[in-house]
Amino acid sequence: MSTQDRSDVIDLLARLALALDDRRYEDLRTIYAEDARTSSPRGEMAGIDEIVALVTRVGSAEERTQHVNGTTVVDVDGDRAEVHSHQLVHYFRDGAAPHRTTGIHFRYTAERRAEGWRLTRGQITPLWQNPAPSR
């Protein structure tokens, strides 16, 4: 396993977090592969167009996010990498403390493509939320 490959894959995760936080959704096209598939509580998405459309649609003009990547393990095998990571997502309004935080576990598969490393498969699983949703 190359240290550079591992670094490149971890960089994808950081660029994903920043693209979401900065609402630069078109940047996802440089992070996910054209044929990427993801699964989350928001649904199943197949292809980069569906991924970009969903995150654009669920974004809120008044609510901001801060994605903080935590514990991350990257296992590289040639041109493929398996990624397991935890992430905190803070939801806030400009100038205010977060009103909600979610702990997420995600698993990604990344592949080395002609254009570089890209995320090809993703499973996003919320673990907890504070405050807890009312029932």
Image (cartoon, rainbow, N blue to C red):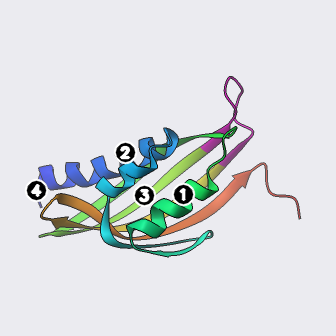
Q: Closer to the observer: label 1 or label 2?
A: 1
Q: CA distance from mark 1 to mark 2?
A: 17 Å
Q: Which residue is mark 1?
A: 55
Q: Closer to the observer: label 4 or label 2?
A: 2
Residue at (51%, 62%) from the top-left corner?
A: 53
Q: Which residue is mark 3?
A: 85
Type of the residue with mark 2: Ala
Left or right of 61 on screen, residue 52: left
Q: CA distance from mark 4 to mark 3?
A: 19 Å
Residue 92 magenta-highlighted = yes
Residue 95 magenta-highlighted = yes
Residue at (38%, 54%) from the top-left corner?
A: 28
Q: Is residue 134 above or below residue 25?
A: below
State the image coordinates of residue 31 (x, y, percent, origin top left).
32, 55
Quadrant assignment for the N terminus: bottom left
Who is closer to the viewer here, 79 or 103? Answer: 79
Q: Does residue 62 appear in this view? A: yes
Q: Magenta stretch: give its range.
A: 90-101
The crowd level at tag 1 (other Cα within 10 Å; few <14, some 14-19, many 20+) is: some
